[in-house]
Amino acid sequence: MLTEKASSSMILGNERRMLLVEFLQKQDGRAELRDIVEYIAEREGDTDRKHRKSVYVSLMQTHIPKLEREGILTFNRGVITLLKVPNGVNLYMEVVGKNDISWSAFYMGTSFLFLVAGFYLASFPLVISSLVYLTMSLFHHAKVRKLL
C-alpha cells in the first residue's frame, strides 16, 4: 500500500481523478458512473458523445481501477463509492482552482520584477535578495509540478 503522500500525489497527478473525487465529495461519497462521466465531460468543456465515451473509457480502464487498488473508492454495478480521501487532496482542491496561479509562480513573477527593479535602481542588495527568492521559487515550482 502506498503512503498517504504517494496516494495524494497519485490523485493530484491527473485532472480526471481530481474531478472524480471532487464529484464524489459533492455527492456525499456515492454516485453513478454515468453522472460522473457527465460531470467530468462538462468540466472539460466538451459534452459530445465521442468525448463522453473517452471519459468513460479512461475512468473504466485506468482511473477507477487505480483508485480501487489504493482503497480510495469501490465500484459496484455502476455505482462508485468514495471510501477515503488521502491527506492533502482536500486542501489542494480548496486552495488551488483549475485556472488559478500557484503561489510558486506568483513568487517567481514578483521576484523577477524586483530583480529588474534592482538592476534599474543599481541596488546590489535588492538584486541579491531577488535572485535568492527567484531561485527558491523556481525550486519550489519544480517540486510542485512533479507532485501534480
Image (cartoon, rainbow, N blue to C red):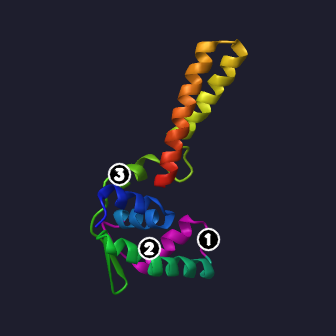
Residue shown at 48% from the left, 55% from the top: 148
Name the amino acid, label 2.
His
Q: Which residues are magenta?
A: 27-47
The verdict on residue 25 being magenta is: no
Residue 46's tag is: 1
Q: Which of 66 and 33 lies nearest the eye of the viewer?
A: 66
Q: Could you tell me how far apart the alpha carbons at marks 1 and 2 are, in whole angstroms?
A: 19 Å
Q: Viewed as shown, does residue 79 lie left or right of 104?
A: left
Residue 54 in the image: x percent, y percent? Answer: 57, 79
Disc 2 marks which residue?
A: 63
Asked whether disc 1 touches disc 2, contact meaning CB atoms under 8 Å apart, the reply is: no
State whether residue 59 is above or below residue 112. below
**What type is the residue that disc 1 sits on?**
Asp
> Residue 81: horizontal and vertical position, in percent?
31, 74
Q: Earlier in the sequence, mark 3 or mark 2?
A: 2
Q: Which residue is mark 3?
A: 88
- Residue at position x 36%, y 67% in the image: 24
First in residue order: circle 1 vs circle 3: 1
- Mark 1 or mark 2: name the one nearer the start of the chain: 1
Q: Nearer the viewer, residue 27 or 44?
A: 44
Q: Where residue 97 appears, x then y in whole percent?
A: 50, 50
CB within 8 Å, label 3 to label 2: no
Q: In the image, residue 124 lies at what x, y percent?
A: 63, 13
Question: Can you say whether 103 is above or below 58 in the image?
Answer: above
